[in-house]
Amino acid sequence: MKQRELEAVLEKYQTPAYVFDLDALARRAEQISACLKQTGIHLCYAMKANPFLAGEMVPLVERFEVCSPGEFRICEREKLPMERLVVSGVYKEREDIRRIVTACQGQGIFTIESERQRRLLSECAREAGVALKALVRLSSGNQFGVDWALAKEMFFRQKDCPELSLIGIQYYSGTQKKKLSVMEKELQELDGFCRQIQEESGIHIEEIEYGPGFFVPYFQSDPEEDICGMLKEFAGFVERMEFSGRITLEMGRFLTAGCGSFLTSIVDRKENAGQIYGIVDGGIHHLNYFGQTMAMKLPYVRHIPVGKRENSREEKWNICGSLCTTADVIVKQFPLAGAKVGDVLVFEGVGAYSMTEGISLFLSRDLPKILFSSREKGIQLARDTQPTDVWNSK
């Protein structure tokens, strides 16, 4: 966001607050789509990255990955089309699936992560009198998905569950991958799996939903991002595959990280043993940078002074949050020129996960407000400050 836009936010709202730039979000999604257009690749938004943006993503992606009953209820409130949902999750509870299957009425796609889930989906579909489309999730060596041998069996035994149409596979092995060669190898393995199913049974797998885990630069020491260059190379991997069905990329962080800013005010300054400590009204319960180590990496932060400053001297600050724990250190030795109590720090690149992954209930601090910014509608309050003490007491 531009400086004047941030200042307009601060004129109306107090910190701490998240601001999500909807114009930046749209530009990012459109750029990704344009870079992948030649391959015919489709996009699926993993809404766990930022559920607040689910409604805003409707014109930008074709599908939404839903991983919990709560996320499904968000989709209902946002009136997302059921046929565009992929209902995923390592734990699927019978009552929840029964309600979702009834609500979807056979629309959308469900993932299968175990033999138990396969039976559960089949039974719920039979009870509702509908047929369901499903993706078999392949394990990448952890608790998610099923062993590749079991996945193959499931395709061979499709007649056991006539209510389920196994249309494809889902695969995700992790986030923040810096090496495209890792993705190339994974796509080759998925291509080989589909070919093997076809050769051994004559079954044609229609779709691969793949989470590439593209890298997002969070820190000043990270290499500069070349979105189109990277996506062009990735598209080359896809074009060399024998697989001829639909390929959908599941993305969360890569789509939304850059559209978010976190605004927090310096509320105290002190010097202990020659070290400058700046206490802010935010903290680690609000900010989470994947890959941060002992608060030593420097994220992208803007300093908005309150009032005019002259001949400001640069100093190294340890920025600490408002929690009563020594763990609440956001960044160490961050250079600030003429910073004072009352100034605002804008932490950038927090459009994914920060607002949900922090230890929000610790110390019963209030949840920050959520703001949307766009040229069309200006600044909108999406969620006001919320107390957490009501959840932490009888």
Image (cartoon, helix red, strand yellow):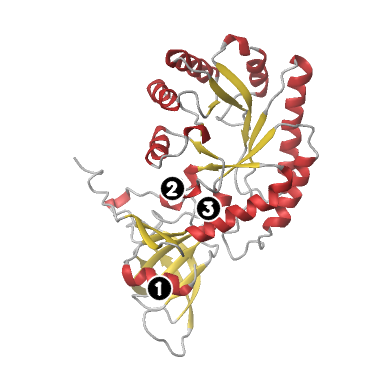
In front here: 313 or 43?
43
Tell me the residue that label 2 is attached to: 357
Q: Earlier in the sequence, mark 3 or mark 2?
A: 3
Q: Amino acid at mark 2?
A: Glu
| Residue 349 in view | no
Question: How far apart in space, not on screen, are marks 3 and 1 (Cα)?
Answer: 22 Å
- In three-dimensional space, the C-alpha distance between marks 1 and 2, rounded to whole angstroms, equals 27 Å
Q: Residue 338 appears in which quarter of the rendering?
A: bottom left
The tag earlier along the polypeptide, 1 or 2, is: 1
Q: Which residue is mark 1?
A: 7
Position of residue 373 measured from the top left corner of the image (x, y, whole percent) = 43, 62
Residue at 58% x, 52% y: name it: 29
Q: 244 above or below 233?
A: above
Give coordinates of residue 106: x percent, y percent: 49, 23
Image height of 380 relative to 64, above or below: below
Residue bearing the label numbered 3: 256
Point out the image quarter for the C terminus.
top left
Q: Residues within 10 Å of mark 2 (few under 14, many from 20)?
A: some
